[in-house]
Image: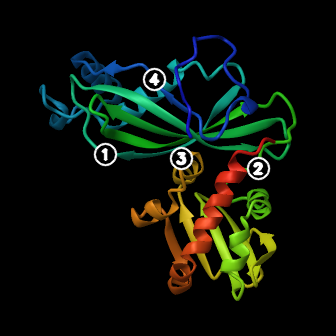
Amino acid sequence: MQTEQAPKPRTTQGRWFEDFTVGETFTSRPRTITAHDLAAFTQLSGDDHPLHAGPDGPLHGPFGIAVAMGLLHGLGLHGPAVLGLLNTHWDYRRPLRVGDTVRLRMTVVRCRRTTDGGRGVVTRHMRLVDDRGGTVQEGTTSALFEASGSGPDPAGRAFGTVAWGETLTANLPAGFADALAGWDGAIGLRAGEHEVGLRVYRGRVIEVAGRPALGPTFTVEADELTWTELVTAPANEFTRFAMAGRFTVRGNGYEYLRLTRPLHLLADAARTAAEEPA
């Protein structure tokens, strides 16, 4: 289950790469949007389009990103170990207006060490929510942090990697082999930009690779937040998430539907692997 954490007191130290865990969630203090905010951002951006004028005019879209970044800074997670922002992918869901009160809800969805071992990339899903809990804007940001050591790092939440696929294989329940006793194919599992394939022959995983030799029979894919919520939920929500469209399939849809039970067991394995220490 995801653990909600209160913002830490502001310090100059912040966190190192290893201090982050996939599945951690944080909620910021509230921020109420004022007429001064609208005037200041209009002057700063130079965008004085009439759309943004008046008490009911929506604020500029990028204002929400700026507020989210400020609320993120207020969580006290960024100290000398943070080396910079790498990317931001952002969606605008609802307009922001003067008088709205918003909070940032942030979930860590990936921690990946760089090749040299001395740094790591932490990806966060960030959701700006209003006082009714509705999502105003959301997206992901990745930041580069100094590492305090060289590893090893947990593989159970490194979704879509070969190491994660191997951890899943080691945690497959006994029913998986029985459910696929007569099957010959490969299952792809994709999380964001990362994908791993499990080559299965008569119930046994005989290869874990970035891409199986003959390609996957089908690939189950979702964003990193969905995988994070799957492995941290109180129960296995794979079927519910799939019916809601949060998991999608690419490739042989017939085989995907035929293997509903084995895929549910794969989700069980993912949830077990996520609880393993480094």
- Secondary structure beneath label 1: loop
| Image depth: mark 2 or mark 4 in front | 2
Tell me, for residue 119, which label it has, or none. Answer: none
Please tell me whether mark 2 or mark 1 is closer to you in this view.
2
SS class, disc 2? loop
Q: Nearer the viewer, mark 3 or mark 1?
A: 3
Task: Looking at the image, tell me whether mark 3 or mark 1 is earlier in sequence order.
Answer: 1
Q: How packed is label 2: few (under 14 Cα within 10 Å), some, or many (20 or more)?
A: many
- Categorize mark 1 by other alpha carbons within 10 Å: few (<14), some (14-19), many (20+): few
Residue 199 appears in the figure? yes
> Spatial distance from mark 3 to mark 4, Cα to Cα?
22 Å
- Please give the residue where the numbered disc 3 appears in the rendered image: 233
Report the Cα–Cα distance between label 3 and label 2. Answer: 18 Å
| Residue highlighted by disc 1 | 93
Q: Label 3, label 1: how many angstroms apart (C-alpha)?
A: 25 Å
Q: Position of residue 192 (x, y in %)?
A: 58, 57
Q: CA distance from mark 4 to mark 1?
A: 19 Å
**Pointer 3 local density, CA inside 10 Å: few below 14, some 14–19, many at least 20:** few
Going 58% across and 79% down the picture, which residue do you hit? Answer: 259
Q: CA distance from mark 2 to mark 1?
A: 33 Å
Quadrant, the N terminus: top right
Q: Which residue is mark 2?
A: 155
Kindly report the distance in space between the C-alpha atoms of the residues bearing marks 2 and 4. Answer: 29 Å
